[in-house]
Amino acid sequence: MKKSIYVPARLETVVSPHDLTLLEYVSALRSSVRATVLAERRRGIPLSEIVVHVQEMVRLKEESMHAQAETSSLAFRAISKCAVGWCIDAYLPPLAERVADRFAAHSPT
């Protein structure tokens, strides 16, 4: 059985605040993920396919950055985890729209 590798979900624990190129990438990725999710959701694409697409975006960036600099693959795993979270956040409607009150706050009797 293959052991799983612990990857922290918080970017601050992996991505250095001094690595400006990576921080700019993460900021741009977050905006891109939200735009991608909204566009593909309108087209009726399921969340699982959107997540795969976003993970592919992160993987391609990781491959291009490894040629340029020494960026940890652990950082890209954390970025990928965060990107999946951003996908879910952008895909699901806001909590106020999701929760339909099944019981009235005041009883008519």
Image: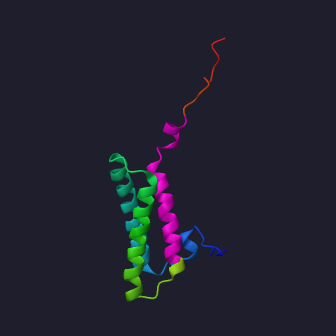
Using the image, determine if residue 65 lies above or below residue 44.
below
Q: Establish if 57 lies above or below 31.
A: below
User: What residue do we see at 34% from left, 46% from top?
Assistant: 42
Q: Indicate the quadrant where residue 25 lies.
A: bottom left
Image position, residue 20 (x, y; %): 42, 79
Above-or-below relation of 92 to 21: above
Q: Quadrant of residue 68 in the image? A: bottom left
* Residue 93: % across, % down: 46, 44
The residue that appears at 37% across and 81% down in the rendered structure is: 64
Residue 16 % position (x, y): 51, 79
The answer to whether any part of residue 15 appears in the image is no
**Callout count:** 0
Magenta stretch: residue 80 in it?
A: yes
Is residue 19 within the magenta segment?
no
Observer-nearest of 6 and 101 = 6
The overriding secondary structure of the stretch rendered in magenta is helix
Highlighted magenta segment, given as a residue range = 75-99
Q: Position of residue 55 (x, y in %)?
A: 44, 67
* Quadrant in the picture for the C terminus: top right
The residue drawn where x is 51% and y is 80% is 73
Point 39% across, 63% down: residue: 53
The quadrant of the rendering that contains the N terminus is bottom right
